[in-house]
Image (cartoon, rainbow, N blue to C red):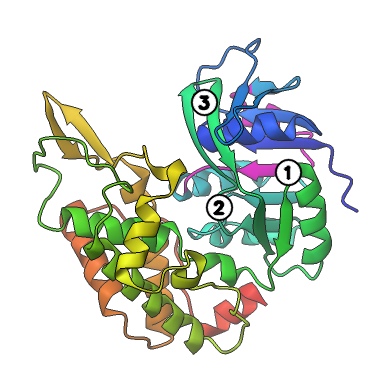
């Protein structure tokens, strides 16, 4: 057993607040956030499925990473991928037993090699544990998954770690055979990017729109067709990597029980918890524009789709749909690049993920 009692949740956004409240029912929690949350504030989580209200128990809120990390047994990171380089620099002087990324895809494992060498367990969930939205900085509405899958980077004790993390999070936690399964999870890196291309392929950041577009509720057959094609390309990459068991990468047609374009569109447009989610757009003087600062653009393309394309390049897999979508992103975004230097080769992949 890891004997984990002190948990630090990094990031005071939607997911961070939901996790802090949840975990505080069982463990000591420190929330590290730059947001202006009064130290005496009581964090609140409202279950969107049951309307149950849960309050945080003695959560310590701080903006100091030194204060947050010094006694942490486990660090739960909810930051976007473009913040992980700074996190890696800050955590290097500390010795948590485990670092858990939620979600774990987006290249985060590439920043954690030094911590892994120090004996820290590096783990990641394959998806977010919650679908959640902040109503205020201290109140979040959240729908929690009943189960989640976890992988560890090079650890042989993933079953025990999954069991312990499951107890901490109060969720069924299924162990995965290797971290590459998380890296290749067909979630945001293809779900978001396929939708964005379908919506905005003839636009750029200066294009005016008359209204906000619902990201999921107005999902189209065109988006579903591209998504299913990109998912097929992802599984071609998985099939080309014969050194690892990637059977845990579940095709979206199975995950969403939708094996046709029409079924996928119907499925996505009828997921209740997604219904109110807007597209990454901002309103300026009565018109709507694509939000270039959104995580959809600053994370899902340069840290999500880009990494999948790098694996495709190394294993000589033709991925025309992924390539088309990424080229569109580069054409409108210019200098938004992945900061992590992958320098991938088959030998490095074998070393990292074995």
Q: Is residue 229 left or right of residue 258?
A: left
Whether 51 is drawn above or below 339: the answer is above
Looking at the rendering, in which quadrant would you find the C terminus?
Answer: bottom right
Q: Which residue is mark 2?
A: 103
Q: Nearer the viewer, mark 2 or mark 1?
A: 1
Which residue sits at x=57%, y=56%? 104
User: CA gap, disc 1 to disc 3?
Assistant: 24 Å
Whether 32 is drawn above or below 156: the answer is above
- Local SS, label 2: loop
Lower sequence index among marks 1 and 3: 3
Which residue sits at x=62%, y=83%? 244
Q: Which residue is mark 3?
A: 34
Q: Is residue 321 left or right of residue 232?
A: left
> Could you say which disc has been placed on residue 169 in the image?
1
* Disc 3 residue crowd, few under 14, some 14–19, many 20+, Cα 10 Å: some
Q: Nearer the viewer, mark 2 or mark 3?
A: 2
What segment is highlighted magenta in the picture? 62-80
- Is 92 part of what is drawn in magenta? no
Which residue sits at x=58%, y=61%? 109
Residue 157, how many percent across, how many down? 82, 66
* Disc 1 residue crowd, few under 14, some 14–19, many 20+, Cα 10 Å: some
- Local SS, label 3: loop
The foreground one among 213 and 259 is 259
């Amino acid at each position: 057993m890891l004997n984990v009692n002190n948990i630090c949740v990094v990031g005071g956004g939607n997911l961070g607040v939901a996790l802090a409240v949840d975990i505080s029912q069982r463990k000591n929690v420190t929330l590290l956030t730059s947001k202006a949350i009064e130290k005496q504030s009581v964090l609140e989580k409202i279950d969107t499925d049951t309307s149950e209200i849960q309050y945080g128990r003695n959560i310590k809120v701080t903006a100091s990473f030194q204060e947050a990390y010094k006694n942490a047994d486990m660090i739960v990171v909810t930051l976007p991928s473009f913040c992980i380089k700074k996190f890696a620099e800050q955590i290097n002087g500390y010795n948590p037993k485990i670092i858990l990324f939620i979600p774990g895809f987006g290249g985060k494992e590439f920043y954690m090699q030094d911590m892994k060498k120090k004996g820290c367990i590096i783990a990641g969930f394959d998806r977010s544990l919650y679908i959640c939205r902040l109503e205020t900085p201290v109140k979040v509405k959240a729908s929690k998954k009943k189960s989640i899958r976890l992988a560890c980077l090079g650890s042989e004790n993933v079953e025990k770690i999954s069991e312990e993390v499951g107890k901490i999070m109060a969720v069924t936690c299924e162990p995965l055979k290797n971290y590459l399964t998380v890296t290749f999870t067909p979630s945001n890196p293809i779900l978001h990017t396929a939708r964005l291309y379908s919506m905005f392929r003839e636009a750029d950041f200066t294009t005016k729109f008359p209204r906000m577009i619902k990201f999921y509720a107005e999902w189209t057959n065109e988006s579903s067709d591209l998504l299913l094609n990109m998912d097929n390309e992802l599984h071609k990459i998985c099939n080309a990597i014969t050194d690892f068991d990637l059977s845990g990468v579940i095709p979206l047609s199975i995950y969403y029980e939708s094996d046709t374009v029409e079924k996928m569109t119907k499925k996505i447009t009828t997921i209740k918890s997604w219904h109110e989610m807007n597209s990454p757009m901002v309103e300026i003087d009565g018109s709507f524009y694509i939000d270039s600062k959104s995580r959809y653009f600053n994370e899902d393309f340069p840290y999500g789709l880009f990494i999948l394309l790098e694996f495709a390049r190394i294993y000589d897999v033709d991925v025309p749909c992924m390539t088309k979508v990424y080229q569109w992103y580069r054409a409108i975004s210019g200098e938004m690049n992945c900061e992590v230097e992958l320098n991938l080769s088959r030998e490095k992949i074998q070393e990292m993920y074995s």
